[in-house]
Image (cartoon, coloured by chain):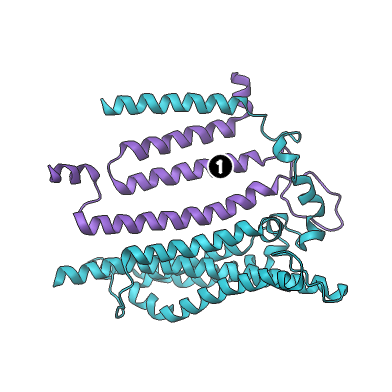
Chain colours: A purple, B cyan
C-alpha cells in the first residue's frame, strides 16, 4: 500500500492539495479566502491531470525533424489543462466581480458578519 | 463543533482519495491506459495530419478543435457575465480608488515597468509566432500580453491605461479575434470537409499545406489577441466598479 502510494507521489500530493483547498472553502467565512481555496482546488486538479500524462524519461511532445523519435509525454492532458487554465482565470474573475457587488451591498466580505447583522 | 466535524469530514475524504491514488496505475508507465488509446496516433501522425510540429498545438487546434471553440465562447461569456454584474454604465475617463490613494506611484516601479513592458510584448509575440513549432502558443502569449497590460495599469494608474488601451479598440480586437476563429474554422466546412480541418478540397494539393499553415497562424494570433484583450477588459471592468462606488459615496 505505502509502496504504491510512493510510486504515485504526484497523485497523493494533488489529493492532499485538493483537501486543503476544500477545507478553506468550507471553513473560512471571508469570501476572498473562499475564492483562494477554490483556486487551490483548481490547481490540484490541473496538477493531477498533468501528472497522469507524465511518461518516465519522456521528452516534450515536439517533433524535431531529422532526429530519431524518442518517447514523448502525453500531449492530451497538457492541451486540456491549457484550456482549463484560461477557464479557471475567467471563472475566478467572475467570482471576484460577484464579491465586489457583495461588498458594495453589505460593506464587508465576511459572511459571518453579515449573518450577525441580520439577527 | 463545526470545526471538528469539518476536519473529520475532510480527513475521511483525504483517506479515500489517497486510497484511490495508491490504486491507480504507477505514474510514468508507458503501458498506462492514458498513454495507449489515441495518444500514439497523435504523436506519430500529428505532424502530417495537423501541420504543426508542436503536438500540443495540434491537439488544441485540430484534434480537439471543438474544445478550443467552447473555451473561446466561455471566455467571452465570462466577460459578458462580469459586465452584467458590475454594470456597463457609460463612463468618463474613470478614476479608481487606486489613483486616489495617498501612496504615490514610485519612481522605481515606473522605471521597472517601462523597461519590462516592451520586453514582455516582444516575448509574447515570439511565443505566439513560434507556437506551431516550439513550446508556446496563443494562450500563453495572450496571457503575457494581459500581464503587460496589468503591469502598466499598476505602474501608471487607471486613467492613463484607459487612454492607451481605449474601449472601442478593445471591442474591435475582441470581435475580430473571435470572428476570425469562426471564419477559419468553418472555411473547411464550406469546402466540403469537416470543422477546423483547414483543408479546402477545391485547391490543388501543393498549395494545401501553405494554406493550412497560414490558417493555423491566423488562429494562433487570434487566440493570443483575444486572451490578452479579454484579460485587460476584465481588469478594467473590475476597476471601474470601484470608481462607480466612489461616485455613489460622494453623492
| Residue under numbered circle 1 | A47
- Using a 10 Å C-alpha cutoff, classify the residue at mark 1 as few (fewer than 14 neighbours), some (14 to 19) or many (20 or more): some
Disc 1: host chain: A
Q: Quadrant of the C terminus of chain A?
A: top left
Residue at (26, 55) in percent of width and height: A102
Quarter of the figure with residue B247: bottom left
Compared with residue A29, is residue B182 higher up or lower down, i.e. above or below? below
Q: Is residue B20 visible?
A: yes
Relative to A103, A39 lies left or right: right
Residue A118: x and y in percent read 14, 45
Mark 1 lies on a secondary structure that is: helix
Residue at (64, 67) in percent of width and height: B220
Residue A111: x and y in percent read 24, 45
Relative to A31, A86 lies left or right: right
Q: Quadrant of the N terminus of chain A?
A: top right
Residue B103: x and y in percent read 26, 65
Compared with residue B57, is residue B236 higher up or lower down, i.e. above or below? below
Quarter of the figure with residue B100: bottom left
Amino acid at each position: 500500500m505505502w509502496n504504491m502510494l510512493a510510486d504515485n507521489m504526484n497523485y497523493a500530493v494533488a489529493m492532499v492539495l485538493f483537501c486543503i483547498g476544500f477545507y478553506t472553502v468550507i471553513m473560512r467565512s471571508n469570501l476572498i479566502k473562499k475564492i483562494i481555496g477554490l483556486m487551490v482546488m483548481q490547481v490540484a486538479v490541473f496538477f493531477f491531470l498533468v501528472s497522469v500524462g507524465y511518461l518516465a524519461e519522456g521528452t516534450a511532445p515536439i517533433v524535431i525533424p531529422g532526429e530519431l523519435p524518442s518517447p514523448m509525454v502525453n500531449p492530451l492532458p497538457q492541451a486540456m489543462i491549457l484550456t482549463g487554465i484560461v477557464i479557471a482565470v475567467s471563472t475566478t474573475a467572475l467570482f471576484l466581480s460577484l464579491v465586489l457587488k457583495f461588498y458594495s451591498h453589505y460593506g464587508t466580505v465576511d459572511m459571518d458578519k453579515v449573518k450577525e447583522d441580520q439577527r | 463543533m463545526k470545526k471538528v466535524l469539518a476536519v473529520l469530514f475532510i480527513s475521511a475524504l483525504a483517506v479515500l482519495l489517497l486510497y484511490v491514488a495508491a490504486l491507480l496505475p504507477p505514474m510514468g508507465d508507458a503501458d498506462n491506459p492514458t498513454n495507449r488509446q489515441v495518444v500514439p496516433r497523435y504523436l506519430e501522425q500529428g505532424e502530417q495530419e495537423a501541420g504543426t510540429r508542436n503536438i500540443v498545438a495540434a491537439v488544441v487546434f485540430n484534434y480537439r478543435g471543438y474544445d478550443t471553440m467552447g473555451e473561446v465562447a466561455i471566455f467571452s461569456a465570462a466577460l459578458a457575465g462580469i459586465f452584467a454584474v458590475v454594470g456597463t454604465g457609460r463612463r468618463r475617463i474613470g478614476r479608481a480608488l487606486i489613483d486616489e490613494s495617498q501612496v504615490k506611484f514610485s519612481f522605481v516601479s515606473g522605471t521597472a515597468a517601462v523597461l519590462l513592458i516592451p520586453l514582455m510584448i516582444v516575448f509574447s509575440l515570439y511565443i505566439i509566432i513560434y507556437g506551431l513549432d516550439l513550446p508556446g502558443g496563443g494562450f500563453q502569449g495572450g496571457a503575457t500580453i494581459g500581464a503587460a497590460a496589468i503591469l502598466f495599469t499598476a505602474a501608471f494608474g487607471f486613467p492613463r491605461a484607459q487612454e492607451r488601451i481605449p474601449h472601442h479598440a478593445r471591442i474591435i480586437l475582441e470581435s475580430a479575434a473571435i470572428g476570425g476563429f469562426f471564419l477559419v474554422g468553418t472555411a473547411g466546412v464550406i469546402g466540403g470537409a469537416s470543422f477546423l480541418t483547414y483543408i479546402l478540397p477545391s485547391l490543388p494539393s501543393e498549395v494545401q499545406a501553405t494554406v493550412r499553415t497560414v490558417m493555423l497562424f491566423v488562429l494562433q494570433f487570434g487566440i493570443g489577441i483575444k486572451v490578452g484583450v479579454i484579460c485587460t477588459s476584465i481588469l478594467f471592468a473590475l476597476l471601474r466598479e470601484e470608481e462607480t462606488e466612489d461616485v455613489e459615496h460622494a453623492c
